[in-house]
Amino acid sequence: MTRSFREKLIRKAFFGFAAVSIIFLLLIILFLFREALPTFQFVSIGRFIFGMEWYPTYEPPEFGIWPLIVGSLVVTSFSTLIAVPLGVLSAIYISEIAPPAVKEILKPAIELLAGLPSVVLGFFGMVVLAPWLQDTFDLPTGLNIVNASIMLAVMAIPTISSISEDALYSVPREFKEASYALGATRHETIVKVIVPAALSGISTAVILGMARAIGETMVVLMVAGGAAAVPESIFDSVRPMPASIAAEMGEAPFRSNHYHALFATGVVLLVLTLAFNFIADYVSHKFRETGSATL
Amino acid sequence: MRDGDIIVTQDVNFYYGSFRALTGVNISFEKNRVTALIGPSGCGKSTLLRLLNRMNDFIEQTRVEGKVLFEGRNIYDPEVDPVEIRRRIGMVFQKPNPFPKSIFNNIVYGPRLAGGMSRTDLESLAERSLKQAVLWDEVKDILGQSAMMLSGGQQQRLCIARALAMKPDVLLMDEPTSALDPISTAKIEELMEGLKKDYTIIIVTHNMQQAARVSDYTGFFYLGRLIEFNRTGKIFTTPDMKQTEDYITGRFG
Ligand SMILES: Nc1ncnc2c1ncn2[C@@H]1O[C@H](COP(=O)(O)OP(=O)(O)O)[C@@H](O)[C@H]1O
Ligand SMILES: [Mg+2]
């Protein structure tokens, strides 16, 4: 075997491996759309997305997923509100402030958080957080937006923290030195130089954290309460899209209207997740090109 | 210690971990003069420079022995605030390092943090500093644009202006032209000439001609020791030490 032939072979092999994941992705998307499209023979796209009622098993059934979309968006937004400060601040603490000994404990601890099976988190939300919420706020149920948002935040924090941390580490040392040499304190340097210089990475981290939260199934299935209605208070139950799909797929007869509608819900979820990823990509490129100059 | 000395080091040793980078350094820097530090790579020039405004504080596991007197006070005394020292002893680095901010915000970064200045104060300070760094004419119409768009030479002059905006007493420059082309280098040497009367400048340089051109005094370092300290004219014509002569004539280093 000549060397150039071997080189060629190796290159082909690597291309093959890389191609496999793309092929899988395409197959899954193809399948998703094939199963989802028949939905729009019995309900219009408008009524499907903006319809206020989700009664897939009634006679006649209603296939409006607006309450599910709102449920997903609400728990994602609230969890972001909780996870962003905690995730970003802990990243700043780990990368810039913590003494080495503390860092050595904190970093693995946060990584461990990322490794917790979501069913365990869901279980915690059900058994510990839900009763506490119910008692403290005198609610009919502790399985609600607040509970789901907190548990999703716990899931998103490691993502946000570790990506932000990478962004903070990659801020050139020269910037920090320049700042210190101008008589800035460490705190001032963090706020005025390091965080702004890492902002594109931090934004990416936040968006990827949100993408993680919106697609998360088990936690919302267990602790969001499952009510398919547009919520009026943060203590209402909701039924985010992934929870709805997971809960109902087992009961929906194969290739029934309900079955197709669930796949269409999956498409909506996919589109939202992709949108988050595109935004993350765009933000990180956009900032990089301009060197976040005006900050 | 001469009367006009602003910084004096006394028996300074400096360690990175267990490695001793400076040994028994006694050197005095006269006020409103330019002092050049020369010597082969790794002889401790940058280490000494960073010692003078406590920039070595940020490197882990370092240790200083001896005294560094700034206006008679040891800057390594525990009660001395390093931030205060760095405001009065500015620094320009080897590689231009403007912040990814606008030109204006680069200049006023330090003064803004120090506080107590109005917008107009800051604007006139920016103008003054940019003029001192001979950059004003080139950037006066683009103060709001990113400093990252400037050329390397312009960036380095911006960094000088930024340091000057703090109105420091001393300006430390660590090979400020080594990353620049000859024209930018000439511009910076020229502006140093203008700064001399108001500032004490200590410049590390690899470039012997540069040391000869810009400085009044020169210190030659070798392996962490100050081998010779003399008037620049003397060092480059009739140095006292054989090692200095060897280095200057290019026989080693
Ligand atoms: N951060 C550091 N950690 C450990 N050793 C260092 C560090 N910085 C410099 N040194 C060592 O100290 C010596 C002096 O370095 P430096 O002051 O940078 O020399 P110069 O500026 O004269 O080239 C060198 O041997 C270098 O390897
Ligand atoms: Mg050096």
Image: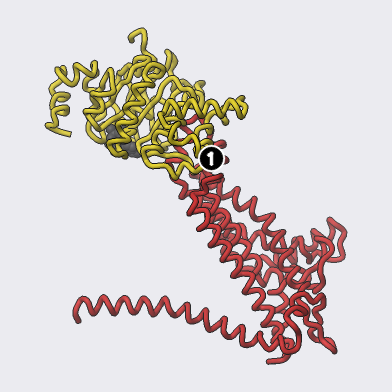
Chain colours: A red, B yellow
- The type of residue carrying mark 1 is Gly
Element type where label 1 sits in the image: loop
**Residue A284, x across and y down, in percent:** 52, 57
Against B188, residue B10 (above or below) is above
Q: Is residue A160 left or right of residue B142?
A: right
Q: Nearer the viewer, residue B27 or B183?
A: B183
Name the quadrant containing residue B164: top left
**Residue A170, x across and y down, in percent:** 46, 50
Against B81, residue A1 (above or below) is below
**Residue A2, x across and y down, in percent:** 19, 79
Q: Is residue B37 left or right of residue B66?
A: left
Q: Residues within 10 Å of mark 1 (few under 14, many from 20)?
A: some
Residue drawn at x 39%, y 15% as measured from the top left: B6
For the C terminus of chain A, give its image quadrant. Answer: top right
Residue drawn at x 51%, y 24% as measured from the top left: B84
Q: How many marks?
A: 1
Residue drawn at x 36%, y 13% as measured from the top left: B5
For the N terminus of chain A, give its image quadrant. Answer: bottom left
Is residue B19 visible to us here?
Answer: no
Name the quadrant containing residue B227: top left
Is residue B199 visible to us here?
Answer: yes
**Disc 1 is attached to a residue of which chain?**
B
Q: Is residue B78 left or right of residue A259?
A: left
Look at mark 1 in the image and give the residue it sits on: B144
Residue drawn at x 71%, y 86% as measured from the top left: A40
